[in-house]
Amino acid sequence: MTIKLKKWDSAEHLKTEEDIARYWEACLEEGGDDPAFITAALGNIARALGLELRGAPARS
């Protein structure tokens, strides 16, 4: 039996403003002193909102 896995994308689960606010709060608690973590979180929020980050590396 083969198990198929799907790559997790946080942006797919950020549907409402409340989802985004809770996600952002959790990210600040978890990795508030890690610039890469916060940058990734902001990228996830931007994608959830349908925004494009200029200068950001393309997602594969």
Image: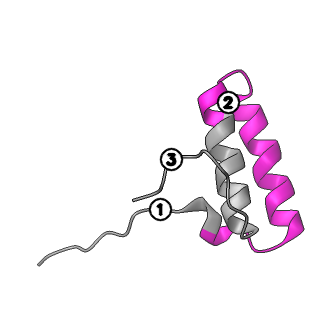
Q: Residue 8 at x, y = what percent?
A: 47, 62
Q: Is residue 13 above or below residue 32?
A: below
State how far apart marks 3 and 1 are (Cα): 18 Å
Q: Position of residue 5 (x, y in %)?
A: 31, 69
Cα separation, mark 2 vs mark 3, equals 21 Å
User: Is disc 2 placed on a helix, strand or loop?
Assistant: helix
Q: What range of the chain is rendered magenta? A: 12-37
> In the image, is residue 38 part of the stretch drawn in magenta?
no
- Tag of residue 8: 1
Of the image marks 2 and 1, the number of the one nearer the N terminus: 1
Q: Tell me if residue 33 comes above or below residue 15 in the rendering.
A: above
Amino acid under disc 1: Trp
> Disc 3 designates what residue?
57
The x, y position of residue 39, in whole percent, is 66, 38
Residue at 71 percent of width and 21 percent of height: 33
Q: Secondary structure at mark 3?
A: loop
Residue 51 screen position, x and y as percent:
73, 64
Q: Earlier in the sequence, mark 2 or mark 3?
A: 2
The 10 Å Cα crowd at callout 1, few under 14, some 14 to 19, many 20 or more, is few
Q: Report the Cα–Cα distance between label 2 and label 1.
A: 18 Å
Q: Is residue 20 left or right of residue 48?
A: right
> How many labels, in total?
3
When asked about the image quadrant of residue 32, the answer is top right
Query: Is residue 41 found left or right of 21 in the rendered image?
Result: left
Quadrant holding the C terminus? bottom left
Q: Can you identify the residue that label 2 sits on? A: 31
Residue at left offset 88%, top offset 67%: 17
Label 2 Cα neighbours within 10 Å, binned few <14 / some 14-19 / many ≥20 = few
Crowding at label 3, few (<14), some or many (≥20) Cα neighbours within 10 Å? few
| Disc on the earlier residue, 3 or 1 | 1
